[in-house]
Each structure stands twice: as structure tokens, then as C-alpha cells.
């Protein structure tokens, strides 16, 4: 009870936006494929390999969450990204968000 009372303000945040959920079950379901497939990623024996795997998984799960075909979304990103100067203008990455994906 004490924990709940002390965290009341934070716990009530979900009431301010109907899209928020009280539990983290959606997040847990989203990362489940990554957790189940961890043995498949043992080849990522370097921090850079692990980072690359995490980035790809993030893009795949983002596509799924936005009801896009992950393959089509990844292909689109790989075609669009080289035309952007993300080093000089990181804000251009917004052009790769699912809302800009041609449907």
C-alpha cells in the first residue's frame, strides 16, 4: 500500500492518455521474439554486433506495431536512408518513420 500511495502521481499518468496501458504486458509481448531468439544472436559476440541486432529488431517491431510488413518497411528504409545526410542533419531521420511509409 505504501508503495502505491507514494507512486500515486506516476501511476495516474495513464489516465491522462487513453492510448496508455496500466500494465507493461504490451512491451513484454513486443520483446518476446527477441528473448526467445537469443540463441540465434550468439554470433553477435561484439558490442557492435549486438547493437546492430537491437536496431534491426527495433525496426521490425516498429513496423509490426504500425501494421506494416516488416520486410517492405526495412527495404523502404534501406532505399531512403542513403539519400539523407543523417550525420549533418539527424532530424532527417524523422522521414523514415512509419507515418511517412507509402501505403
Image (spheres, rainbow, N blue to C red):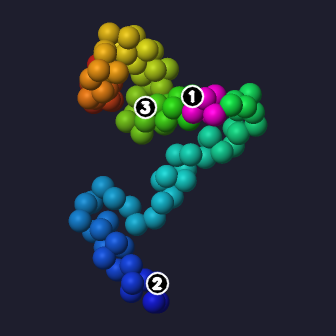
Q: Which residue is mark 1?
A: 52
Residue range in magenta is: 47-51
101 left or right of 63?
A: left
The picture places residue 36, in percent across and down from the top left corner, at: 69, 43
- Could you classify mark 2 by the number of other residues whose Cα lies within 10 Å: few (under 14), some (14-19), or many (20 or more)? few
Q: Residue at x 40, y 28 (%)?
A: 68
Q: Indicate the quadrant containing the C terminus: top left, top right, bottom left or bottom right.
A: top left
SS at circle 1:
helix
The picture places residue 66, in percent across and down from the top left corner, at: 37, 36
- Residue 3 circle label: 2
Q: Which residue is mark 3?
A: 63
For the question of whether residue 48 can be seen, the reply is: yes
Camera-side mark, 3 or 2: 2
- Could you classify mark 3 by the number of other residues whose Cα lies within 10 Å: few (under 14), some (14-19), or many (20 or more)? many
For the question of whether residue 72 can be seen, the reply is: no
Q: Which circle's residue, 2 or 1, is located before the other in the chain?
A: 2
Q: Farthest left residue?
A: 16
Q: Which circle's residue, 3 or 2, is located before the other in the chain?
A: 2
Q: Residue at x 42, y 39 (%)?
A: 65
Distance, label 2 to label 1, CA atoms, is: 38 Å
SS at circle 3:
helix
Q: Which circle's residue, 1 or 3, is located before the other in the chain?
A: 1
Distance, label 1 to label 3, CA atoms, is: 17 Å
The picture places residue 38, in percent across and down from the top left corner, at: 70, 39
Distance, label 3 to label 2, CA atoms, is: 36 Å
Q: Is residue 74 magenta?
A: no
Amino acid at each position: 500500500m505504501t508503495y502505491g500511495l507514494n507512486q500515486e502521481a506516476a501511476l495516474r499518468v495513464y489516465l491522462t492518455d487513453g492510448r496508455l496501458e496500466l500494465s507493461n504486458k504490451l512491451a513484454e509481448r513486443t520483446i518476446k521474439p527477441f528473448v526467445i531468439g537469443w540463441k540465434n544472436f550468439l554470433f553477435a559476440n561484439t558490442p557492435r554486433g549486438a547493437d546492430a541486432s537491437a536496431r534491426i529488431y527495433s525496426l521490425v517491431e516498429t513496423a509490426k506495431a504500425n501494421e506494416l510488413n516488416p520486410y517492405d518497411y526495412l527495404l523502404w528504409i534501406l532505399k531512403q536512408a542513403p539519400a539523407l545526410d543523417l550525420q549533418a542533419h539527424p532530424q532527417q531521420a524523422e522521414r523514415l518513420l512509419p507515418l511517412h511509409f507509402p501505403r
